[in-house]
Amino acid sequence: MTKSELIQRIAELNPHLYHRDVERIVSTVFDEIGIALSRGDRVELRGFGAFSVKHRDARVGRNPRTGAAVEVDEKHIPFFKTGKLLRDRLNDGA
């Protein structure tokens, strides 16, 4: 599902809300999650999952084409761990 599909679905389920307001709400939620992660905070949505930031140390990697050693800088990556309710919903439907 894309962001625009999510906005459309929420707008359909809530006909009392204007489409532009739904867009603003969805964008604000995503922006706030991004801002919290950039501060190093953890964002937990009960039953859905938790967003956090993982730290990867600098290391020496290999160029797969040439095999030459390459310095890889340290980096921070977003990480999502599913909540129990979401995991159960996915596995019960299988």
Image: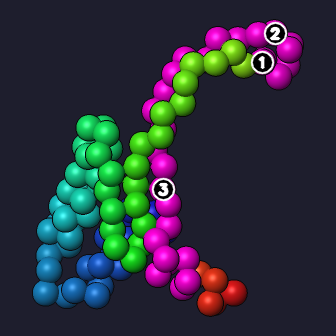
Q: Which numbered disc flags the more N-terminal residue, 2 or 3?
A: 2
Residue 3 screen position, x and y as percent: 39, 62
Please tell me in which quadrant of the rendered image residue 91 appears.
bottom right
Distance between the Cα atoms at labels 2 and 3?
32 Å
Distance between the Cα atoms at labels 2 and 1?
6 Å
Q: Looking at the image, which is closer to me, 41 or 31?
A: 41
- Identify the residue shown where x is 49% and y is 77%: 84
Q: Looking at the image, which is closer to me, 12 or 27?
A: 27
Residue 81 shown left or right of residue 31 in the figure? right
Callout 3: few (<14), some (14-19), or many (20+) C-alpha neighbours within 10 Å? some
Q: Is residue 73 visible?
A: yes
Q: Secondary structure at mark 2?
A: loop
| Residue position for label 2 | 68
Residue 26 screen position, x and y as percent: 26, 63
Q: Which numbered disc flags the more N-terminal residue, 2 or 1?
A: 1
The numbered disc on residue 62 is 1
Image quarter in which the C terminus is found: bottom right
| Residue position for label 3 | 80
Up the image or down, 42 lies above or below 22; here it is above
Stretch of the chain drawn in magenta: 62-89
The numbered disc on residue 93 is none
Callout 2: few (<14), some (14-19), or many (20+) C-alpha neighbours within 10 Å? few
- Give the total of numbered labels: 3
- Identify the residue shown where x is 19% and y is 65%: 25
Please tell me in which quadrant of the rendered image residue 72 appears.
top right
Amino acid found under the numbered disc labelled 2: Ala
Q: Looking at the image, which is closer to me, 13 or 70?
A: 70
Residue 73 screen position, x and y as percent: 55, 17
Are dots 2 and 1 in contact, CB under 8 Å?
yes
Q: Looking at the image, which is closer to me, 26 or 35?
A: 35
Amino acid found under the numbered disc labelled 3: Phe
Residue 67 screen position, x and y as percent: 86, 14
